[in-house]
Image (cartoon, coloured by chain):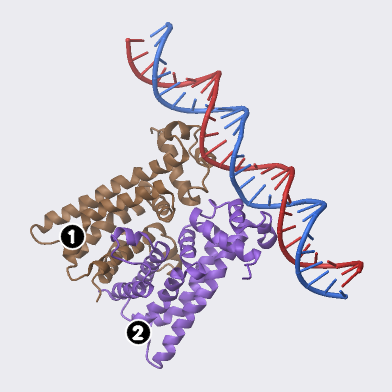
Chain colours: A purple, B brown, C red, D blue
Amino acid sequence: MTKRSTKDRILDASEALFARDGSSGASLRAITQRAKVNLAAVHYHFGSKDYLLEAVLARRLLPLNAERIRSLEAYQQKAGRKKVRLENVIEAMVGPALRLSRDETKGGRIFMRLLGRLVLEPDARVQKLLTGQFETVLKKFEPALTAALPHLEPQDFFWRLHFLVGSMAHTMADSERIRLISGGICDPDDTEGTIQCLVTFLCGGLRAK
Amino acid sequence: MTKRSTKDRILDASEALFARDGSSGASLRAITQRAKVNLAAVHYHFGSKDYLLEAVLARRLLPLNAERIRSLEAYQQKAGRKKVRLENVIEAMVGPALRLSRDETKGGRIFMRLLGRLVLEPDARVQKLLTGQFETVLKKFEPALTAALPHLEPQDFFWRLHFLVGSMAHTMADSERIRLISGGICDPDDTEGTIQCLVTFLCGGLRAK
DNA sequence: ATTTAATTCAAACGTTTGTTTGAACATTCG
DNA sequence: CGAATGTTCAAACAAACGTTTGAATTAAAT
């Protein structure tokens, strides 16, 4: 067994503690202690606490969005000249994210909780990074979405996209509450079932009225 | 003009800074400075920083949930012996919350951002307070909801309720991003328009398939 | 093997943190 | 009035914070 590098151990520990305690609540001392690494290693490898947070985000966000786009393009190719079904567009958008959020080997659940917290953090650099990522994805998805929802006014279109993001983010970030409030009826560990349920809900909402 | 009491000034300042910087990011010194109050006043009036946070929450949550239940009961009375329409049940659930979130005189926008942040905070006391509040509301709404959605399996029912909470929370907490990503097309200050748009989307999703 | 560079480490830096203290001030009540 | 209670205040507390430093150690290159 070859043990993980210092950098990776710091990233893993940061992800976990940023998610649990928030970006200001998690201290570098707690992080380095968990990573079994010297305190100064953070500044040596990442420069500062802020840059460390950016690195934690980039490590997961870049592959995720690449996978979303890849998935959409696969559906587009399969559809050939016809337009992609709404269900498939939505699946390409929320499927990869939800699958990542449930993939423990990639720290998914933890990362998604962190992401959920950061959405409301007003730190300028973090916000720029997040909205930048979102716009990249949106630009790729917008044509397919409008094609699948031709009757929708622009105003309703963007609002419903906003609602979609809310449902998706909430489902990814908070996977245990649903088990609690449903009295165990719903199982968030059934990833594909959750995705299908979410896609159905979202398509119903997007097509409403 | 009669100026606000020390306690209220502390609550106002705490709400704003907890929302902006997080519960651990906001320092008591920043809070008391903003409130124009002595540092020790927090401990005198509230006991500790943690109890202060609880007080900030209780001040808004208790009236909000009372208003939700009041609104649902008004619809039930108007419906008489018939069951309440789904649109009205949802309006009673999300309407008061969204109206509060847009009511500047009650610090709504600020409070909702705080609420959005706290949902993912694992602090035990905060979590107990939040889920307790939610369960109180759910218990009142569940009969009306299942009556309006008779064909829905329990599993789908709870999942969709979960998605609903996500859309609602996201819309309440983050009122400026929608303006940004829509290029100004959507106006989050149009409270009633937003509510109607959200209700339509949610009912569409809840009734899907 | 010797030099050079990359990495780790313990220790300390100056701030800022939540909390406590005891005296000063204000208000209320007998 | 004076006693008593409620409230504010400046100052200090120890602890924890992010960051820096310079020497010790390891790895790579010559």
Residue B199 to residue B126: above or below: below
Rendered image quadrant of residue C29: top left
Residue A11 at x, y = what percent? 59, 63
Residue A5 versus residue A70 in the image, above or below: above
Task: Check disc 1 and give the amino acid type.
Answer: Ala
Question: Which residue is the extreme one toward the front?
Answer: A1
Q: CA distance from mark 2 to mark 1?
A: 34 Å
Q: Secondary structure at mark 2?
A: loop
Label 1: chain? B
Of residues A131 and B152, the one nearer the viewer is B152
Disc 1 residue crowd, few under 14, some 14–19, many 20+, Cα 10 Å = some
Disc 2 designates what residue?
A85
Find residue B81 and report its horizontal and vertical position in percent: 7, 59
Judge from the rendering whether residue B23 lies leftward or rightward of residue D30; answer left or right.
left
Q: Is residue A160 above or below residue B51?
A: below
Residue nearest the observer in this picture, A40 or B68: A40
Looking at the picture, how far across and down is residue A123, in whole percent?
54, 57
Residue type, mark 2 in image: Arg
Q: Nearer the viewer, residue A94 or A191?
A: A191
The disc label shown at residue B144, or none: 1
Chain letter for the residue marked with disc 2 in the picture:
A
Query: Residue A162, how many percent across, how many down?
Result: 39, 67
User: Label 2 crowding class (10 Å Cα cut-off): few <14, some 14-19, many 20+?
Assistant: some
Which numbered dot is residue B183? none
Is circle 2 on the same chain as circle 1? no
Quarter holding the N terminus of chain A is bottom right
